[in-house]
Image (cartoon, rainbow, N blue to C red):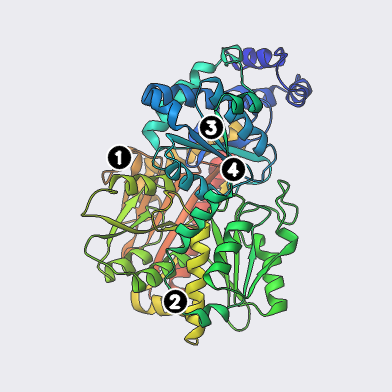
Amino acid sequence: MTYKAIYQAWLEDDSLDAELHAELEAIKNDEVAIKERFIQPLAFGTGGMRGVMGAGINRINNRTIEKATAGLACYLLEQYGSEAVSRGVAVAYDSRHYSAQYAETCGCVLAAYGIKAYIFSQLTPTPVLSFAVMDLNCVAGIVITASHNPKEYNGYKVYDEFGCQLTLKPAQELMTYVARFEDNSDLPILSTPDKAVRDGLWQWIDGDLLKRFEQAVLSQSLLGSASSKAQLKIVYTPLHGTGLKPVSEVLRQAGFSDLHLLEAQMEPNGDFPTVMSPNPEEKEALKMAIAYGETIGADLILGTDPDCDRIGVAVNDGEQFVLLSGNQVGALLCDFVLRHRELTPTSMLIKTIVTSDLGAAIAKHYGVQVLETLTGFKFIGELMTRFAHDESHNFVMGYEESYGYLIGEHAKDKDAVVAALLISEMAAEAKANGYHLQQKLTQLYEQYGYYLDEVHSFTLSGLAGQACIGRIMDKVRRQGQALFGAQSCKDYAAGVDDLPQSDVVKFFFDEGGWLAIRPSGTEPKIKFYFSLKGNDSCQAQEKLQILLAQVTELVEKTAAEEVTE
């Protein structure tokens, strides 16, 4: 069917809810809007299936959630047979608009296929869903979330029986099942929650599972000094998301009694009214928490994103609060965890190819194996699963530059709850020894070399933006290392270093620096990852400014060519 035919079929579908139907009526004469909504269906990217909420196959709505879950049900029945029916699927959701409704839709679709659904009775962090899949011995898990994206977005993540997000091959297989439901009339007659409960196909997940998760997180504690913990003053904000209960409960149980919650951002709210974007990678997201921390003389600021799998950090250096990057926090955690953990030659750290090499240098200093994966924590989870019963690899920690960390094996996805605990412990240790984390970071630079790591993104929206991103990647590949004066380059689309093919090109420079370029898998952006090593910050900054100017010129020229055409 053409996109116009699909649009017309949706417009004439009497079962479509009134809100979506009104949106379709409103764009009747807008060719561009119709095309963008119906030219192609949403697909699984870096963090599941994610998109703007609204009407159309290229939007997140109740119908696309139905189709995705119907495809998943068929996929699971073919893969697991009767085991899928008996073991079931765990379903969680975050604080975004319609998330609870979409989670209910998932349960109703699963029940229509005779598959039991374990549904969380309240909004729940993504890492808790990963834990729940393993804890309940489910065949799969679903979480309704768009993670750190702006309020207009929502999404659909699928987890395998090991609590790991679906990686490339199983996600592609799943999409072939989802594609069977091109026609809305092909969808099954849905059950209702009440009927599913009566049929034994719907079970609410209560607070006991969350308590088991919290105990699993607390078992990763590395600092025994109760007095050090009690003396650290922390401000925490869940940014209107799911992190409030688990993060505050874990920190208090661990002994952080001087914990202050930012009340203005405590309540779950899909509008995220106090921030431009609920993304702890962005400075503005922690602005209110830092202002509150300044008034009470806090030592540490923590902020988690809506589904509580990423965490932002600011530390008081004695004069002001300094925001730490994801790479910096990752390096500090590497040092803290590896200093306190009992290590063996089998101990393993996993990082992504766009994550700074400082953490890897620290790990190698401690004799820890370092493995690299493609961008996306699902690939870290995939390696954890592969080596779960391999005595030659013992997982200690995994992290990525985009503010995601995991210590321990209670989940197979990034976990801001366990990260909040260990970041607080290393800050408490630092304070007890008369220094702060910014000073510790300086010590690491002195020992391992100065690393300057930044990410610069360019937003290019709509079909035109998508085409422009493709043109940029094409130029990068055609011109190769000469484009940026690099020593060498790797095109991961060819499948290098025993990794799956991926739309990433990475340029390597003298003295250990690099630049990686990739389209975002979750937003209409192209991302440039700079990791430059120098003798000091001035030298590294000079390198960054030269490269950034070249990158900006590349993007602007390509966008202008597109407009001209």
Say left or right for 110 vs 495.
right
Q: How far apart are marks 2 and 1 (CA)?
A: 45 Å
Q: What element carries label 1?
A: loop
Q: Distance between the residues labelled 3 and 2?
A: 40 Å
Q: Which of 174 and 151 is in front in this view?
A: 174
Q: Distance between the residues labelled 1 and 3?
A: 37 Å
**Amino acid at dot 3:** Ala
What percent of the width, then of the height, locates residue 210?
54, 52
| Mark 1 or 3: the one toward you | 3
Label 4 or label 1, whichever comes before in sequence order: 4
Reply above or below: 353 against 564: below
- Disc 3, disc 2: CB below 8 Å? no
> What is the quadrant of residue 261 in the picture?
bottom right
Residue at the spot of label 3: 117
Residue at the spot of label 1: 495
Label 1 or label 3, whichever comes before in sequence order: 3
Q: Distance between the residues labelled 3 and 4?
A: 21 Å
Residue at the spot of label 4: 146
Residue visible at 75% across and 21% down? 21
**Amino acid at dot 1:** Gly
Label 3 or label 2, whichever comes before in sequence order: 3
| Mark 4 or 1: the one toward you | 4
